[in-house]
Image (cartoon, rainbow, N blue to C red):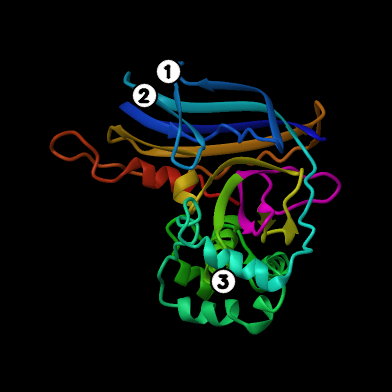
Amino acid sequence: MPRFIIHHVTRYTYEEPVRDSANQIMLFPVKDENQEVQSQQLVITGEPFVEVFKDYYGNEAGTFMTLEPHTELKIDSTIAVVTKFRIFPADDIAIEEQWNHLYQIRYVVPFIDFLKQENFVALGEVKKIADAGFYKSVSVYVAVQQLNTYVYQNFKYIKGITGVETTLDEIWKLRAGVCQDFAHMLLVMLRLLGIPARYVSGYVCPHDNDLRGEGATHAWVEAYIPFYGWLGLDPTNNCIVNDRHVRLAIGRNFSDCSPVKGTYKGTAQQSLEVGVSVAEDGLVTKEISAVLTPQVVTVKLNEDGTINNSYRKYMEMQQQQQ
């Protein structure tokens, strides 16, 4: 059972003071039979009170406000987490029975939300691939791995060419992106087959071999396997998720799992830096810190003093998962 110390820093700086900053953070790891959170230290500029609650999908989320004028907002999270090795599906149930089970639960909560399909122009093209006969001629467990491999082999991993506002049509046309794009495309394909699938935000923790997605929060997918439960699939690395992945939150898509989002009052330009580092068993085995190139955003005020461009939009753009 590996034990990881994960340090995640998000720092916003402003050229002039801003105020009335209201934020939501989803930086609290999932706690279940596969993941034990031993400790978490959260330090935020100004030491605001953080109210923690459970959202609709069972994720822990925190909200806080910083009313006083400030030129920096730093959110510093350090967690100690132990992950456990997972037993994969035995895959010994008749293929027809597995697909029939998925058909029977299609209108059952909570599967409904994770079957809802986003409509886009190229959906028909994607459906031809997802509907290819050999997928449903095999077990659900084998089918999800085939689609996971398809995304890995047919999409190029290129940083910087997409953002959280990149549409599925654009991802399909580019056939490239980062982990959140790979995850979103796999979600589409799984749902087209009637397989409930959910987006997962977290960290990937390398060991002997480098893995794509280092240096920022990572993203992958969990698919529902009949008579087994949720199975993690990482199309960015073409693997089944096990004890090298640490989960932060689950949802329908990225917007449900955004690490930081919020709003503030002020006209100052802002820049953002994000860094993540991982230590295993107390020793840094792989320093995966990454500082994003600061990007400047101008936020304009309405006549009543509120902003007319959501700060959340820019925060999500910069918090893009890799």
Q: Who is closer to the viewer here, 216 or 41?
A: 41
Camera sees residue 147: no
Which marked residue is nearer to the observer: mark 3 or mark 2? 3
Is 64 positioned to the left or the right of 246 in the image? Answer: left
Q: Residue at x 51, y 81 (%)?
A: 125
Q: Amino acid at mark 2?
A: Met
Residue 96, image x, y percentages: 67, 73
Q: Amino acid at mark 1?
A: Pro
Asked which quadrant contains residue 39, the reply is top right
Q: Who is closer to the viewer here, 45 or 172?
A: 172
Residue 27, image x, y percentages: 55, 33
Q: Is residue 5 magenta?
A: no
Is 212 positioned to the left or the right of 173 in the image? Answer: right
Which label was assigned to residue 48? 1
Label 3: which secondary element: loop
Which marked residue is nearer to the observer: mark 1 or mark 3? 3
Q: Residue at x 72, y 51 (%)?
A: 241
Residue 299, image x, y percentages: 30, 42
Residue at the disc numbered 2: 65
* Contact (Cβ within 8 Å) of mark 2 with mark 1: yes
Residue at the disc numbered 3: 193
Q: Which residues are magenta?
A: 202-229
Sequence order check, earlier mark of 1 and 3: 1
Label 1: which secondary element: loop
Q: Is 304 rendered above or below residue 213?
A: above
Q: Residue at x 72, y 75 (%)?
A: 138
Which label was assigned to residue 57? none
Sequence order check, earlier mark of 3 and 2: 2
